[in-house]
Image (tube, coloured by chain):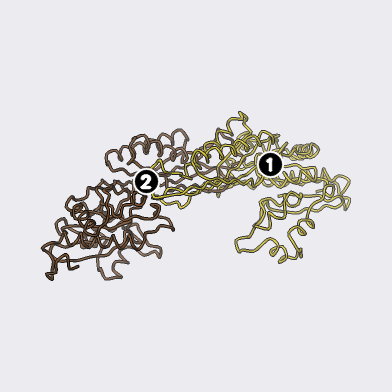
Chain colours: A yellow, B brown
């Protein structure tokens, strides 16, 4: 959930992180999305973003026009505050009610594609092979090695997607496709890991005698959360009798992008076992209620003096 | 293509290697197929083998009954000869017309499944992970290592299937499924490699803190080709003015199983670049014609004395 306060009205927009076309609306709103990224996307019905936008009344002529019309210009929003589950186990483990987020880790994602000749698993002798699947396996191991090599707890690297083709037991893989995710609270350190992975992909391709293509899907800088917002969150929690923990957000959110155009902050609530992006992801009604309460009081605190109808904060 | 001669009639059955239910009809005909293997198979329309067999008039009550009724008892067939493309590059490279197969390599296939907890790629720190995909990657590398460790050219090992779940870039793999193919002309050496792979799967599971299940799909002994059949093939080729090469079949065929119930032999023809199990698999009309000619003369030679209508071999 995200709340955005316009310069002189209380204007709350509720939004999900992602849509059929964008993984982060905030990326588009903050002007960090290139129109040609939308040009190649179709939803599950084969509809383009332009068609979908026009169908709901945006009336734009092109993706660039829609992006220009919907962008949130720097200065047009005083504060951007986002409420989210932690997606990690720390609040639950430490029995803290509210996370006051200090910074959002810098995410990057890349796709690597290896291409060999394939062949019959029984007939193709080992010295003649250029097995794309084994190239992929070596790279997945290298992703982990480069991640651990920073020596920093905050560096995480994952080969989340791994597919081989033709994917038949009696067929030497002729293609392998990897989707790799790298994040760190330190953008430069994260970039070093990404470069090491790209270097490994090239070296493995030579060793395995396969072709390789790489595609950097995104490589975003980290974001710091505004200190006034952090203070407002902490005060709101205290007012509601809730305990707090100052912490980093390891997952990224709309806030990562909105931080480029407005002072931004995040509120975390605990989620069971820290699980996320899996069907048993869960947050309790009590924790959700706590989060909403802190969000409301935080926005009231930040909007002090901008309250349209004269009500005081305490009357909310 | 396979030709089977019954004890006193010329009876040629044309058959494909595989069907919707069986990868090798020969496995069933030779009595090497367990009924419970059929019990769990459905074709792409959800039809069971029993339903499909009854629909075309087999009229069996159960899978076991059908297998019993269609098995080829040892002694009921004098010779089993199979014509096939080489599925390798040697005949083409050496400019030989016909391969006289001396033995068929022993195939084995196994499935390995790793199970971890998964997690969010950004939020789950490295020390807390039990990444099933990395367990799979390590095992794929180990399959190659154990294969090469025999030091024998004839040993081949392949991780043909590699799938992770949920297979999303921002999700640590919680499951990995591998399909592994191991073959060798020496059955015992092949079994050593299979055991090493199983041992590695267990060791990797401990190291990676994942669960593992393994399933041996098949592990068949090699087969030697009957020397009289080899002689007949060579003579047939000579009669047609074709060059020959004595060679091993690295792929397996119905012949691997028929060799358990009848003297068996195989005829190879060249295929382009040795490619097989890929869309550009190709054999020329000339080579196919050569193969058919050798097959016919071979069967005539073997059936000498059994020729129903009194024609001599030369009159074919």
Task: Specify whether disc 1 shares its chain with disc 2.
Answer: no
Give the image location of residue B226, x and y in percent: 19, 51
Please name the residue shown 74% across and 48% down the image.
A32
Please name the residue shown 39% across and 43% down the image.
B213
> What residue is pinned by disc 2?
B181
Q: CA distance from mark 1 to mark 2?
A: 48 Å
Is residue A47 among the parts visible in the rendering? yes
Which quadrant of the view contains residue A39? bottom right
Give the image location of residue A178, x and y in percent: 55, 46
Q: Is residue B219 left or right of residue A240?
A: left
Front one among A13 and A242: A13
Give the image location of residue B120, x and y in percent: 59, 43
- Check the residue under mark 2 and report the chain it is in: B
> What residue is pinned by disc 1?
A268
Q: Residues within 10 Å of mark 1 (few under 14, many from 20)?
A: many
Front one among B24 and B41: B24
- Check the residue under mark 1 and report the chain it is in: A
Label 2 element class? strand
Give the image location of residue B210, x and y in percent: 46, 38
Which quadrant of the view contains residue B55? bottom left
In this rendering, is residue A207 above or below B295? Answer: above
Front one among A131 and A295: A131
Front one among A109 and A199: A199
Label 1 element class? strand
Q: Is residue B194 left or right of residue A213?
A: left
In this rendering, is residue A47 above or below B252? Answer: below
Mark in front: 1 vs 2: 2
Q: Residues within 10 Å of mark 2 (few under 14, many from 20)?
A: many
- Report if the CB atoms under discs 1 and 2 are less than 8 Å apart: no
Looking at the image, which residue sits at the far top? A151
Q: Which mark is residue B186?
A: none
Is residue B261 among the parts visible in the rendering? no
């Amino acid at each position: 959930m995200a709340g955005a306060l316009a310069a002189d009205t209380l204007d709350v927009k509720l939004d999900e992180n992602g849509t059929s076309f964008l993984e982060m609306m905030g990326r588009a709103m903050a002007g960090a999305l290139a129109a040609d990224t939308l040009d190649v996307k179709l939803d599950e019905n084969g509809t383009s973003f332009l068609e979908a936008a026009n169908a709901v009344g945006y009336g734009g002529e092109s993706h660039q026009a829609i992006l220009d019309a919907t962008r949130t210009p720097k200065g047009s929003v005083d504060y951007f505050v986002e409420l989210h589950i932690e997606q990690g186990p720390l609040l639950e483990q430490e029995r803290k009610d509210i996370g006051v987020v200090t910074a959002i880790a810098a995410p990057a994602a890349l796709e690597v594609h290896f291409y060999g000749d394939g062949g019959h698993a029984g007939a193709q002798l080992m010295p003649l092979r250029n097995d794309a699947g084994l190239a992929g396996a070596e790279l997945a191991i290298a992703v982990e090695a480069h991640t651990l090599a920073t020596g920093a707890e905050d560096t995480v690297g994952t080969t989340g997607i791994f597919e081989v083709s033709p994917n038949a037991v009696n067929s030497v893989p002729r293609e392998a496709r990897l989707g790799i995710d790298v994040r760190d609270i330190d953008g430069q350190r994260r970039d070093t890991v990404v470069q090491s992975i790209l270097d490994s992909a090239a070296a493995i391709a030579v060793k395995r005698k396969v072709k390789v293509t790489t595609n950097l899907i995104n490589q975003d800088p980290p974001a710091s959360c505004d200190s006034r917002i952090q203070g407002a969150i902490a005060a709101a929690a205290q007012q509601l009798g809730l305990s707090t923990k100052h912490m980093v957000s390891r997952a990224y959110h709309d806030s990562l992008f909105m931080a480029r155009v407005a002072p931004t902050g995040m509120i975390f609530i605990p989620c069971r076992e820290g699980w996320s992006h899996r069907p048993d992801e869960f947050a309790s009604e009590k924790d959700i209620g706590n989060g909403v309460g802190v969000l409301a009081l935080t926005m009231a605190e930040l909007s002090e003096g901008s309250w349209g109808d004269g009500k005081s904060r305490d009357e909310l």
